Amino acid sequence: MRIGELSKATDVPVPTIKYYLREGLLPAGELSSPNQASYDDTHVRRLRLIRALIELGQVPVATVKEILESLDANAEPLHEQIGRAHRALTPARRLSATDEARSAAAAQVADLLRSRGWTVEPSAPALATLIDTVAAFRSLGQENLVADLDRKAEAVEAFTALEIDAVTANPTRDQVAESVVIGTILGETLIASLRLLAQESISAERWRDR
Amino acid sequence: MRIGELSKATDVPVPTIKYYLREGLLPAGELSSPNQASYDDTHVRRLRLIRALIELGQVPVATVKEILESLDANAEPLHEQIGRAHRALTPARRLSATDEARSAAAAQVADLLRSRGWTVEPSAPALATLIDTVAAFRSLGQENLVADLDRKAEAVEAFTALEIDAVTANPTRDQVAESVVIGTILGETLIASLRLLAQESISAERWRDR
């Protein structure tokens, strides 16, 4: 298809497509004449992925490029390829807490990883975020809200195992990698909105008469 | 205690405390002389909560005021009081999706609420976000990632029940309300970081040889 048809198929304006081509986010089409390139379904998929990253994930263009490069690095083992995309998508969030709360939190999280048998890189951004979050609960006098961290992690593990089962069911390696990227971004909003609805429903029951 | 001691106890600068007093976020101290006010532990707690809302929740000052007012509205039933704070904290996120995907998503989410027996207000912001998110998965050709929505919701419900148990264990109504506010904000980061760590650990196992 020509660039105009690609634009129609994806609802992305032609100038935006040209910008992605110039930036190297989208691979060039096949030249059918010196001034005319032709695009196919791989371009449609790639464009949808770019839009998802930018619109839904609010990922900066430079990071999008990095993620796409890691998706295209087929020479790497899949796990490393996915790990690179994952890290680019999930920067650590820093929260303030007292030093005392932070060191208690670090010990609690280390226990958690051991008891659940989770193996994670010590430099994983989510690890720093988890420690900071537990520390913030403690700093605010809400340690009882993280007292049952292990059971909470167990519930989250059940959710994540379902996500990974679905992603793994993809037939090709490229599709696995693409699903991981989309699933990482949209899955966060999915779990957050399910949690808020569950809260509303359960709390309505519990506190109706209080 | 005097304002300088309050500042020391909370690590919030005196001018910032004065700003919160002027804006009505923090109740006035008791006048011990015409030019001198005295503050107590309720001020310390309230200041910590304000900082959590602003720093961790990135809640705008006007919304903080609204949330604090709903916390202080002791005349209301607790459930409504909490519901008001909850909604102020959780604006809907709009994601783009095709109309077709959105109507399929709305039907899927309606089924989910029925099958889990969740009762939520049709105007709940998280409901719009959930529908948009499911629609975005479908628009991106990832319907298999939301095919098992009911089992995912079950896992999230287990997490949420633990949260609500912990919050409910607070002895006073004020503490319940404060825990809900902090738990809503920090709980989102908690569940998100646990999910990323579980993903890293489970995917390392599954994809090591692929």
Image (cartoon, coloured by chain):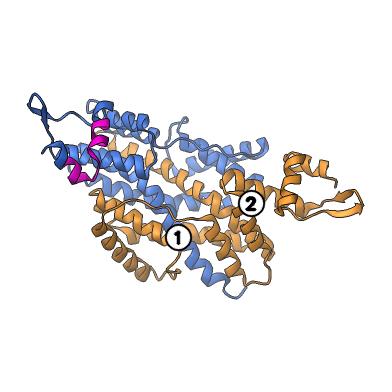
Chain colours: A blue, B orange
Outermost right residue: B33
Please provide percent x and percent y for residue A196: 47, 59
What type is the residue that disc 1 sits on?
Pro
Quadrant that contains the C terminus of chain A:
bottom right
Q: What chain does badge 1 belong to?
A: B
Q: Where residue A142 is drawn, which disc sits there?
A: 2
- SS class, disc 2: loop
Q: Position of residue A147 (x, y in %)?
A: 58, 51
Residue visible at 47% across and 31% down in the picture: A122
| Magenta highlight: main SS | helix
Crowd band around label 2 with a 10 angstrom C-alpha radius: few (<14), some (14–19), many (20+): many
Q: Which residue does the image show at 27% across and 46% down from the upper left?
A: A167
Q: Nearer the viewer, residue A33 or A133?
A: A33
**Would residue B128 appear left or right of B62 to someone viewing this image?**
left
The amino acid on which the numbered mark 2 sits, given as a three-letter code, is Gln
Q: Which residues are magenta?
A: A6-20
Q: Mark 2 and mark 1: span between their CA atoms?
A: 26 Å
Tag 1 secondary structure? helix
Where B150 sits versus B114, above or below? above
Q: Which mark is residue B125?
A: 1
Label disc, if present, on residue A30 of the rendered structure: none
Q: Is residue B16 above or below residue A87?
A: below
Q: Residue at x 89, y 48 (%)?
A: B36
